[in-house]
Amino acid sequence: MRVLGTAGHVDHGKSTLVKALTGIDPDRLKEEKERQMTIDLGFAWMTLPSGEQVGIVDVPGHQDFIKNMLAGVGGIDAALLVIAADEGIMPQTREHLAILDLLQIATGVIALTKIDLAESAEWIELVQAEVLELVEGTVLEGAPVVPVSATTGEGLDVLRHALDDVLARVPTRFDRGRPRLPIDRAFTIAGFGTVVTGTLIDGTLQLGQEVEILPKRLKARVRGLQTHKQKIEIAQPGSRVAVNLVGVSPEELTRGDVLTVPGWLEPTQLVDARLHYLAEASRALRHNQQVEFFSGAAETNAFVRLLGVHNLAPGEDGWVQLRLSQPVPLVRGDRFIIRQTSPSLTIGGGVIVDALPRRRHRRFRPEVIEHLETLARGSPADLMLDTLDRRGPLPAREVIDNANVPAATAAQALAQLLCQGQVFCLQPEETTEHEPSAIVLSNRYIASPGGWNTLRMRIVAEVTRFHRDNPLRQGIPREMLKSRLKMETRLFNEALARATYEGALVEANSIVRHADHQVRFSPEQQRAIEKVLGQFRAHPYTTPSYKDVIAILGEPVTQALIEGGQLVRLNADVLILPETYAEMVAWVKHTILERGSVNVAMLRDAFNTSRKYALALLEYLDDQHITRRVGDERVLR
């Protein structure tokens, strides 16, 4: 299914022509009918001579409503540029054509309307010649020009066939497996609830599907789908869709929000882009100039940071970083328009090459420009490598999504990178034990050497910081390290496994340390330790309490002895030597194997200790899954 968008000056007959072609009046607002002027977006559809259906987005032509026009043309496949034969080329004709060109709308048809009002056939030919000159060097160069009258019907069949021919040559929309629906309308239908409409891109939508509305991060479910008032179960990319939602109200939604599947699309306020500044602009574009930014159905203010030049002259292209006033859900390859605020006028547009740059770029840096040029011309493999270098390890599916090409193409490129060793699976054993295609399908974390090195240094630096602040500790507890790094659980587990596999860190008993880290006590501390350990050796089964040891050594030294394995802490109060622990555990196991079970009294009597110590040991063995309590007895697990 294709989507056609109208364009052209106010009162040149766009809506009238749409109604003549389709039988549907796209002007739906009372004010539009009273003023006989399109104010907001209108929608219609028709069946072409070939039998294919096409949706039509009718946009306003008046300059006061250009923002509404921009909300409608972002997702169209082709344009129907409407020029009245009795008036010819007018200001909004030029501005709308410039917008089509900046958005790279691939093709279209030019309709010369109101030929019944033109002075003569010669006048129509003159206007037609002016139109052909106007579109030279634009996306509509070579587009058919069809004289037509919506009033008399003359030329309508020729126009339908011209549209059919043009739309038949439009490439099929890619299904990237990640649907996006820029919302251009949100309303309520009695008995159904919330409905949103838009042009679906990048993937399919299905009945019952869980969706997310960005940038508000609202969750909803698809209760119904329609296209051209026909109920459907699956909406295909490139079609006009009405989506009935459960879980949100129209009041929560605004034009420019994006409906998508949860978890993959991140709203952004900073984008890198290639900008074309229109030759018609009255003055040079200044660094940090404020503009109005439009993409899809979204609109916000932005500041344009010029990265390679001091000012951008009319007609020039340049690399820019746009700082958006509000978060907008965008991806690489999205087109955009910028307009100056006073007087309100379209001055440029371009394409986003990075929707999530990691930082604000410094100006006039050759490496920044080189990086952006790589993104602009890069293959899927180049883009994935760049993403992994900048953002660090990512799940395979997220790497594929960021390539912004069909998922199958990106998955193949990622598998090839794995085969070539240019990227690797973060979990060490995965890289050697599984085929690259299986790693991609299992959604393991993928890393590039550069991205992993950055993350590894961050992890090691956190462990170093802990060693510096806690010199008597063996290392940082695993969960504390994860909390300090603020990392997602699976990424943390795989990254720590990789760091220990490479020898940068050591993990033992959920304690993480540098491979060469050793606890070093002062001579005074060492003498105190020997004195305390002597007491433990003298009375191995009735040892000093935890509080007693802390009173002598202090908590940091005591904790260091426990973490270093020089003392075993059975519970909050009981400490014993590791050799005593080993002796008692061996006795418990042997006795259970001989007699079937042990109890507190048996252990107490065997070692001439007290009930407190015997109970502490048996409960500790239960916690360690060595024994299991059955009534008052313990048996082996």
Image (tube, rainbow, N blue to C red):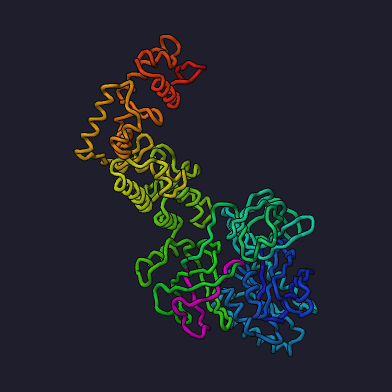
Give the answer, above or below, for where 273 lies relative to 90: above
State the residue in front, 77 or 246: 246
**Quarter of the figure with the N terminus:** bottom right
- State the residue lying farthest toward the left: 523
The residue shown at (65%, 88%) is 126
State the residue in front, 121 or 535: 535
Residue 17 highlighted magenta (yes or no): no
Q: Quadrant of residue 560?
A: top left
The residue shown at (19%, 38%) is 523
Give the answer, above or below, for where 445 lies relative to 622: below
Query: x and y percent of residue 236 in the render?
Result: 65, 55
Residue 381 in sight: no
Query: x and y percent of residue 205 in the render?
Result: 65, 53
> Position of 614 compared to 171: left or right?
left
State the residue in front, 282 or 174: 282
The residue shown at (32%, 27%) is 544
State the residue in front, 319 or 264: 264
Q: Quadrant of residue 602?
A: top left
Report the label total: 0
Query: x and y percent of residue 141 in the render?
Result: 58, 76
Residue segment shown in magenta? 273-297
The residue shown at (71%, 75%) is 39
Query: x and y percent of residue 300 in the render?
Result: 56, 70
Residue 284 highlighted magenta (yes or no): yes
> Position of 375 compared to 115: left or right?
left
Give the answer, above or below, for where 88 lies relative to 321: below
> Position of 287 compared to 100: left or right?
left
Residue 452 in sight: yes
> Position of 609 compared to 625: left or right?
left
Give the answer, above or below, for where 506 lies relative to 228: above
